[in-house]
Image (spheres, rainbow, N blue to C red):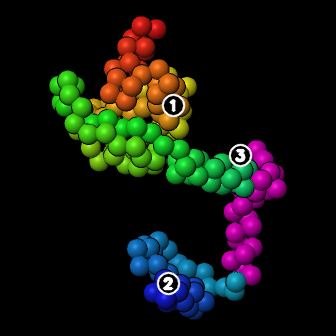
Amino acid sequence: MPFASFLEDIVDRRAENGAQIIFEDQCYHGQFKRGTRRDSADNLRAELAAAARSLGMTVDKLVEFRAWIQRVDKELDERLSREMALVYTVSRERTRVLAVQYISLREAAKVSLHGAARPEDIVFECELLDLDYLYRGLVLRGQYLFVSERAVAEGSRKYTPADLLSGLVHERQAA
């Protein structure tokens, strides 16, 4: 934390002194208007009002909308960490199971991203959150087979652990 605080102090000092480039990766695109923090706050309010007008909203509605987006994002982030999935790694020919993992949906999305040979093999976090509704609890992409927690629970009541995967696949093929 001390390093982050140090960088923040540098950025604040640059802004107060009217530096043309405040951040290291920022490009200078014209004359920087020196002013007070009040001018900056007024500019931010004007930009916020312009953004609200362009969306056909009031500033208050735009602020409420932003708060709603942040709340939804936080809830989805919590679900990705809390909900689990069974991830089977299958051979390229899809004839053998090479590994099985019981991991969070966030980790499952990362596994899919890093193990994908092609872009269409990637399973996104939003798909994993709706695995039961989109794919009836089971989806195969590339060399990974993702099974939702709910499908595992239902399948565990019907099948032995050794027959779980084949039982779930046969159920979905029959439907």
Q: Say which amino acid is labelled 3.
A: Leu
User: Which residue, given by chain and number where applicable, does mark 2 sit on?
Assistant: 1
User: Which residue, given by chain and number where applicable, does mark 1 sit on?
Assistant: 153
Relative to 51, is 82 on the left or the right?
left
* Residue 119 can be seen in this image: no
Q: Say which amino acid is labelled 1.
A: Ala
- Determine the image quadrant of residue 112: top left
Q: State the separation of the CA atoms marked 3 and 1.
A: 45 Å
Residue 149, position in %: x, y?
A: 50, 35
Label for residue 107? none
User: Which residue, given by chain and number where applicable, does mark 3 sit on?
Assistant: 55
> Can you say whether 43 is above or below 64 in the image?
below
Residue 37, position in %: x, y?
A: 70, 83
Magenta region, mostly helix, strand or loop? helix
* Residue 60 can be seen in this image: yes
- 1 or 2: mark nearer the eye: 1
Secondary structure of residue under mark 2 = loop
Q: Residue furthest front?
A: 160
